[in-house]
C-alpha cells in the first residue's frame, strides 16, 4: 500500500541554524505542556482549525527528503513544526524555527507524511500539509560478461516493488528487456552480439490502492551502466589439454613490452601455481592468431567448466605454430604459462605440463578476448 507505512525516526533539519528554543526537542519526545496544547489537533480531521490565509507548500519531494515552505498574512516570531504519528494518533514535535522554510531529510521512501505549522508563541494551528515520498532509484551493476551475455545485479529495491530493466546499443533507444521482483537481485541478458557495447538502466515500480483506486508509482531511472561483450575467438582442432610453460626470467630484452609487463610492479607470482599474474590474469603466450598486442586480456574456458582470465605476455613464434598460428605443433599446446622457476609446483615441473594442475585441467573449449 502506498501509504501503509509511516516513518518516525528521520531527522528534520532547517536550512537556517537550528534555534535553541525550548520547543526544539528531540524528535519523537513531546513534553507534557506541549502535548496538552496538541489535544485540540490530535487528529488530521481537525484541519478545519487552520488559518484560512495561511499556505504550506511542499516541493522537491523525492524518496528521502522534501522541502516545506509556508507563509501567511500574520508574521510570527517563531514557528513550531510537528509531524503526525498515526500509530499513537498524535502530533509530535520536530523543531521550532524563525524561518519559513524547512528541509526534511531521512524520510522513508514511498511513505505518506503529515506535518503542521503552529505559532510557537500561542500554539495556534496555522496549517496542515500531507505528501507521499517517491521511490528510491535502484542501482545496477555489471557483474559478469562473455561473448554473448551480460550478467547484471540490482540493488536498493523496496520490498514488494518490481524492477524494470532496459537496454540499448549506441544510437538506439532504450527498450524494456525484463521485469524482476524485489526478491530477484540478478538477471542475465543472453543472446547478445560479441564485441558489442550495451547500455543498461533500471527503475522500480510499486502498485497499490489509494482511495479504492489502483495507483502505480515509478522511480527515476538508475545511473546508466555499460558493458562490452567479449569477442569469441576460433579454436584449433587440437584439444589444448597440454599447457606448456616458460621461465619468465628468460625474457631479457629490457626495452621489450614483454619484459616491461613481466617485471612491472603490477606483476606478481601466484603462490599456488607459480605463474606470473597481472590484475588477476595469468601471464601466457599465445599464437599470433589470437593477437599480438602485449597486455591483451582473454577469458579461457576449460572442459571442466572452470574459467580463467589470462593476459598476453609473449607471443609464440609463427615458425613453431600451425598454419593458422593457433597452437604450437611440438606439443599441441594452445596456452603457455610464464612462471617463476622456484615457485613451480612439483607435479607441473615433473610432468612438464601445467594441465596437470586442477586449476588448468581439461581441454580448451573457448577463448574470448576482452575488447
Image (cartoon, rainbow, N blue to C red):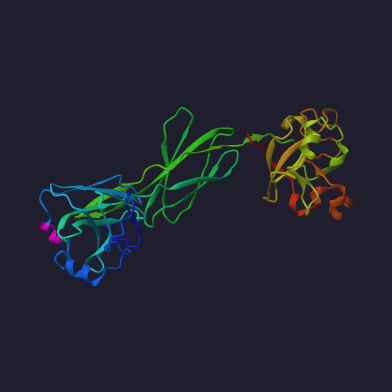
In-front residue for pair 204/51: 51
Up/down of 44 relative to 273, above or below: below
At x 31%, y 59%, the residue is 20
Residue furthest to the right in view is 350
* Magenta stretch secondary structure, dominant: helix
Q: Camera-side residue: 268 or 283?
A: 268
Residue 258 location (% of width, % of height): 79, 34
Can residue 340 be seen? Answer: yes
Based on the picture, tell me whether residue 48 belongs to the magenta stretch.
Answer: yes
| 144 horizontally vs 156: left or right | right
- Image quarter of the C terminus: top right
Q: Quadrant of residue 109?
A: bottom left
**Residue at horizontal 69%, vertical 38%?**
297
User: What residue span does the magenta drawing correspond to?
Assistant: 45-49
The percent position of residue 37, horizontal first and vertical second, equals 17, 67
Between residue 124 and residue 212, name the one nearer to us. Answer: 124
Indicate the position of residue 92 as horizontal and vertical percent values: 26, 64
Q: Is residue 107 above or below residue 32?
A: above
**Residue 104 spot, x, y in % from top left:** 32, 52
Residue at (81, 52) in percent of width and height: 356
- Quarter occupied by the N terminus: bottom left
Mark yes or no: residue 327 visible.
Answer: no
- Residue 333, quarter of picture: top right
| Left/right of residue 66 with respect to residue 38 in the rendered view | right
Viewer-side residue, 45 vs 76: 76
The verdict on residue 341 being magenta is no
Amino acid at each position: 500500500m502506498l501509504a501503509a507505512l509511516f516513518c518516525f525516526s528521520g531527522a528534520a533539519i532547517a536550512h537556517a541554524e537550528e534555534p535553541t528554543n525550548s520547543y526544539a526537542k528531540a524528535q519523537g519526545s513531546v513534553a507534557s505542556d506541549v502535548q496538552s496544547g496538541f489535544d485540540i489537533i490530535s487528529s488530521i480531521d481537525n484541519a478545519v482549525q487552520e488559518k484560512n490565509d495561511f499556505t504550506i507548500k511542499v516541493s522537491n519531494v523525492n524518496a528521502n527528503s522534501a522541502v516545506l515552505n509556508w507563509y501567511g498574512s500574520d508574521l510570527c516570531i517563531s514557528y513550531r513544526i510537528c509531524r503526525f504519528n498515526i500509530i499513537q494518533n498524535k502530533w509530535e514535535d520536530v523543531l521550532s524555527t524563525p524561518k519559513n522554510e524547512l528541509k526534511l531529510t531521512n524520510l522513508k521512501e514511498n511513505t505518506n507524511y503529515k506535518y503542521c505549522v503552529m505559532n510557537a508563541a500561542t500554539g495556534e494551528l496555522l496549517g496542515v500539509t500531507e505528501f507521499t515520498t517517491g521511490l528510491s532509484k535502484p542501482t545496477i551493476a555489471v557483474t559478469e560478461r562473455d561473448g554473448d551475455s551480460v550478467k547484471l545485479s540490482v540493488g536498493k529495491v523496496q520490498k514488494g516493488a518490481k524492477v524494470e530493466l532496459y537496454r540499448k546499443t549506441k544510437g538506439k533507444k532504450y527498450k524494456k528487456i525484463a521485469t524482476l521482483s524485489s526478491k530477484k537481485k540478478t538477471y542475465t541478458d543472453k543472446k547478445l552480439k560479441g564485441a558489442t557495447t550495451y547500455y543498461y538502466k533500471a527503475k522500480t515500480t510499486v502498485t497499490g490502492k489509494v482511495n479504492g483506486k489502483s495507483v502505480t508509482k515509478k522511480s527515476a531511472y538508475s545511473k546508466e551502466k555499460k558493458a562490452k561483450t567479449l569477442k569469441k575467438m576460433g579454436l584449433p582442432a587440437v584439444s589444448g589439454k597440454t599447457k606448456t610453460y616458460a621461465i619468465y626470467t628468460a625474457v631479457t630484452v629490457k626495452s621489450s613490452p614483454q619484459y616491461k609487463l613481466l617485471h612491472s610492479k603490477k606483476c606478481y607470482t601466484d603462490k599456488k601455481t607459480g605463474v606470473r599474474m597481472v590484475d588477476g590474469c595469468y601471464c601466457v603466450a599465445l599464437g599470433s592468431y589470437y593477437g599480438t598486442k602485449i597486455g591483451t586480456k582473454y577469458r579461457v574456458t576449460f572442459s571442466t567448466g572452470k574459467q580463467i582470465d589470462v593476459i598476453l605476455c609473449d607471443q609464440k613464434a609463427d615458425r613453431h605454430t600451425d598454419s593458422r598460428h593457433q597452437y604450437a605443433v611440438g606439443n599441441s599446446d594452445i596456452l603457455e604459462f610464464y612462471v617463476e622457476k622456484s615457485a613451480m609446483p612439483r607435479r607441473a615441473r615433473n610432468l612438464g605440463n601445467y594441465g596437470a594442475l586442477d586449476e588448468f585441467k581439461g581441454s580448451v573449449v573457448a577463448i574470448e578476448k576482452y575488447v
